[in-house]
Image: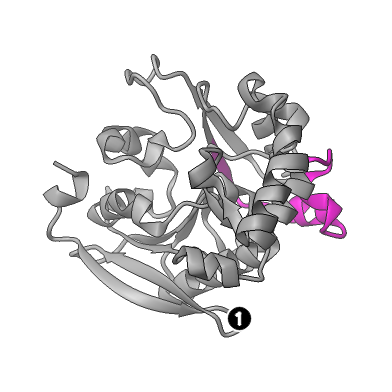
């Protein structure tokens, strides 16, 4: 039984977000049954559909939060990926527009931002000044020299050989077929690869990137896992060390500490881990005190 099957009282409202450039983004509101205590945007990881976060968003609504999930542009289908001209910074713009929608609908309620992997990297590019709390999950930079040992020495082959060739042939990055990451639009893969090969990561394409990170002063909760195959401790430290003016609470766990067989990069948002959300997410959301 999925977690959301046990909460049929939570109302799902499909909607369309209008990005600042006029692009339509598919999204879903998860509405609590009673008066909401806050609002939450769930910002996705690279190549991860909104549907993956449905159980988590349902849980948020069951705790009294209005929650919004959304799909990044170009992720609707292979055809959409082939037609997509945007890059990672375009996706950061989508995340900013999605947060604006949550802020506009919050009606004075505290607003929290939950960023999974890439969603955490987008924090300096969204309206963080209006947030009550920021939570990042399995989020770090992708600079290859900081990768976990299992992928570190394969990364240059991916970024300099496999990804450019496969993208040129297919018209998008066919990661699912290659069993290396997942399907991604060509422009996203090209820019991401450029970042991952550079020590300054996104700074290669973003002027005054350090100032963007330094502008973030909202309290942050940083959740990571020792068996994350994509984000090492060093990668996570590299990202969050750039938020020099944000108070941070770091939570790093092994699967054994959480009494689970495996967590990895994507495991945390699976419905079987709902009890962990009560402990590791809920106390750090804006509006938590109002639930008492």
Q: Position of residue 109 (x, y in %)?
A: 41, 66
In the rendered view, tell whether residue 245 sits above or below residue 96: above
Residue at x-position 27% and y-position 47% = 292
Toward which corner of the image does residue 70 lie, by quadrant?
Answer: bottom left
In the rendered view, tell whether residue 119 sits above or below residue 84: above
Toward which corner of the image does residue 66 lie, by quadrant?
Answer: bottom left
Secondary structure of residue under mark 1? loop
Residue 31 shown left or right of residue 72 in the figure = left
Residue at x-position 77% and y-position 47% = 195
Residue 150 shown left or right of residue 213 in the figure = left
First to last magenta residue range: 197-222
Determine which residue is flagged by label 1: 20
Residue 89 seen from this side: yes
In the rendered view, tell whether residue 5 sits above or below residue 158: below
Residue at x-position 65% and y-position 60% = 186
Q: Position of residue 59 (x, y in %)?
A: 27, 49
Assess disc 1: are there few (<14), some (14-19) or many (≥20) residues with their C-alpha within 10 Å of its C-alpha.
Answer: few
Q: Position of residue 38 (x, y in %)?
A: 37, 61
Residue 89 shown left or right of residue 184 in the figure = right
């Amino acid at each position: 039984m999925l977690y959301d099957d046990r909460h049929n009282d939570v109302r799902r409202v499909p909607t369309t977000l209008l990005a600042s450039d006029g692009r339509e983004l598919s999204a879903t509101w998860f509405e609590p049954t009673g008066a909401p205590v806050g609002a939450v945007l769930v910002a996705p990881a690279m190549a991860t559909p909104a549907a993956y976060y449905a159980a988590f968003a349902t849980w948020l609504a069951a705790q009294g939060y209005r929650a919004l999930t959304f799909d990044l542009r170009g992720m609707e289908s292979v055809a959409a990926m082939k037609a997509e001209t945007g890059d990672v910074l375009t996706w950061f713009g989508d995340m900013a527009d999605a947060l604006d929608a949550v802020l506009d609908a919050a009606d004075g309620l505290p607003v929290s931002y939950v960023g999974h992997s890439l969603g955490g990297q987008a924090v300096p590019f969204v309206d963080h000044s209006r947030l009550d709390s920021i939570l990042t999950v399995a989020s770090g930079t992708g600079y290859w020299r900081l990768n976990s040992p299992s992928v570190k020495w394969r990364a240059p082959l991916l970024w300099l050989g496999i990804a450019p060739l496969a993208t040129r042939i297919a018209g998008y990055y066919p990661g699912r077929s290659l069993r290396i990451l997942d399907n991604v639009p060509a422009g996203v893969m090209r820019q991401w690869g450029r970042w991952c090969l550079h020590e300054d990561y996104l700074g290669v394409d973003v002027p005054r990137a350090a100032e963007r990170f330094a502008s973030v002063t909202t309290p942050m909760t940083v959740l990571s896992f020792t068996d994350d195959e994509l984000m090492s401790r060093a990668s996570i430290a590299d990202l969050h060390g750039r938020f020099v003016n944000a108070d941070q609470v770091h939570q790093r766990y092994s699967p054994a500490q959480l009494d689970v067989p495996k967590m990895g990069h994507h495991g945390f948002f699976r419905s079987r881990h709902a009890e962990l959300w009560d402990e590791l997410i809920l106390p750090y959301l804006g509006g938590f005190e109002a639930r008492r």
